Image (cartoon, rainbow, N blue to C red):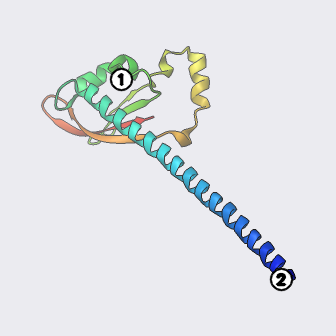
Amino acid sequence: MGEYQLIYTAIAAIVFVTAIIGGRFFIVSNFVQADIESQTTTRELNAMSLSYNILDCLKQDGDSVQAGFLDGNTGKNICELCGICSLISEAMVTDLEASEREWEFKYSAVSKLPQTLSDKLLVWRDDRNKKSYSVYLDIDYGEESHMGMLDVNV
């Protein structure tokens, strides 16, 4: 009887250790997945928040974006235009009714760097981690208004 008890004890110990290791692996893998999803959500929320901040800046306390303002400020960086200097972001406004009309605004943080350094930084930028968000807006041409889209890449 003592011989069988030793075998049963060894089997029980192996099952117990396997259950502990398996449970630990299950819990750790679920927490890692939750952390990755949390970071993705945070980046998406940052892109959305920045999109609405840039939209408010382009509207200049009005109801729509003025086409003259876009024409006069196209190519400028977001830092000079809106005072948003801490993020690396770019924006583009597209007139959806007149497809040849686009206004592009450069990266805010990168635009202050020397040209050689900013070129190297933009070449090595990882596009997989870049998040974008789009917002519809009205572009006022004076007599008429067109539907437009603001695309912000963070």
- Give the label on residue 74, or none: 1
Q: Quadrant of the C terminus?
A: top left
Q: Position of residue 56 (x, y in %)?
A: 26, 29
Seen in the picture, residue 62 relative to 146 is either above or below; the reply is above
Q: Nearer the viewer, residue 101 or 74?
A: 74
Viewer-closest of 144 and 153: 153
Q: Residue at x 83, y 78 (%)?
A: 7
| Measured Cα–Cα span from mark 1 to mark 2 | 84 Å
Visible in this render: residue 14? yes
Q: Quadrant of the N terminus?
A: bottom right
State which quadrant residue 100 falls in.
Answer: top left
Q: Position of residue 31 (x, y in %)?
A: 55, 52
Give SS at disc 1: loop
* Residue located at (19% from left, 30% from top): 141
Instruction: Say what amino acid the circle numbered 1 marks.
Output: Thr
Instruction: Estimate how packed mark 2 is, as few (under 14), some (14 to 19) or many (20 or more) residues with alpha carbons within 10 Å.
Output: few
Q: Is residue 85 left or right of residue 55?
A: right
Q: Are marks 1 and 2 in contact (CB under 8 Å)?
A: no
Which one is nearer the viewer's eye here, 143 or 152? Answer: 152
Disc 2 residue type?
Tyr
Which numbered dot is residue 4?
A: 2
User: Quick check: 119 left or right of 102?
Assistant: right
- Up the image or down, 36 lies above or below 104; here it is below
> Considering only vertical position in the picture, is 115 above or below 127?
above
